[in-house]
Amino acid sequence: MTEAMARLSHATSIDELVNVLRECARTIARCDGVTVIRREGDRVAYVAEDAMTPLWAGERFPIENCISGLAILEARPIHIPDIYDDPRVPVDAYRPTFVRSMSMYPIGLMGPSMAMGAYWAEAGPIDPSTSALLASLARYAGVTLGRVTHGKGADPA
């Protein structure tokens, strides 16, 4: 977590922010996959992933039809211990994947414009300490997002 926060504090672009999340969140969460999602109007785009098998990188979905979009719209984390027991989950999109449980975290301080998802191959609740770490990472990513999108890049080295 310390490394991720240090790297986020030096990020000067959204691409760098996305790379830090993609590279660090999976280790922090001890999960089987991570995705980074960006809002694009009434759709969400899966812009990066680090997962045991491919998920949705490069795909776009209606914002109200996916959990990442709901986390952005509701501006709150969403935890789903079993994707087959939650009516919000579009199970047809998940059936061919390893995903059985997930947590989705909105990113952005003044209204989320991104989200980070963590996925596990086994169904079950997320560990509270893992959830707290991911929530902290998402909040810090929100600070970074605000800084890099408002032209206030990192301090020069």
Image (cartoon, rainbow, N blue to C red):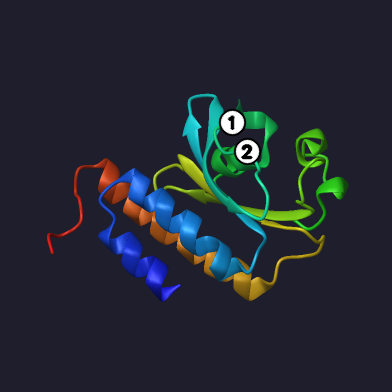
Name which residue type carries label 2.
Answer: Trp
Name which residue type carries label 1.
Answer: Glu
Considering depth in this image, is 49 or 145 the residue closer to the camera? 49
- In the rendered image, residue 59, in percent from the top left (x then y), is placed at 59, 31
Considering depth in this image, is 54 or 115 the residue closer to the camera? 54
- In the image, residue 132 above or below residue 74: below
Residue extending furthest toward the right: 85
Give the numbered dot on residue 79.
none
| Residue that appears at 45% across and 72% down | 1
Q: Secondary structure at mark 2?
A: loop
| Residue that appears at 60% across and 30% down | 63
Q: Secondary structure at mark 1?
A: loop
| Residue that appears at 77% across and 58% down | 121
For disc 2, the marked residue is 56
Q: Quadrant of residue 62?
A: top right
Q: Is residue 117 visible?
A: no
Mark 2 Cα shell of 10 Å, populated few (<14), some (14-19), many (≥20): some
Mark 1 Cα shell of 10 Å, populated few (<14), some (14-19), many (≥20): few
| Residue that appears at 42% across and 49% down | 18
For disc 1, the marked residue is 59
Q: Is residue 40 visible?
A: yes
Q: Is residue 84 left or right of residue 25?
A: right
**Cβ atoms under marks 1 and 2 closer than 8 Å:** yes
Image quarter where the C terminus lies is bottom left
Q: Is residue 17 left or right of residue 57?
A: left
- In the rendered image, residue 120, in percent from the top left (x then y), is placed at 72, 59
- In the rendered image, residue 40, in percent from the top left (x then y), is placed at 47, 28
Residue extending furthest toward the left: 156
Considering depth in this image, is 83 or 87 the residue closer to the camera? 83
- In the rendered image, residue 48, in percent from the top left (x then y), is placed at 51, 44
As measured in the structure, the alpha-carbon distance from the residue carrying label 1 to the one carrying label 2 is 5 Å
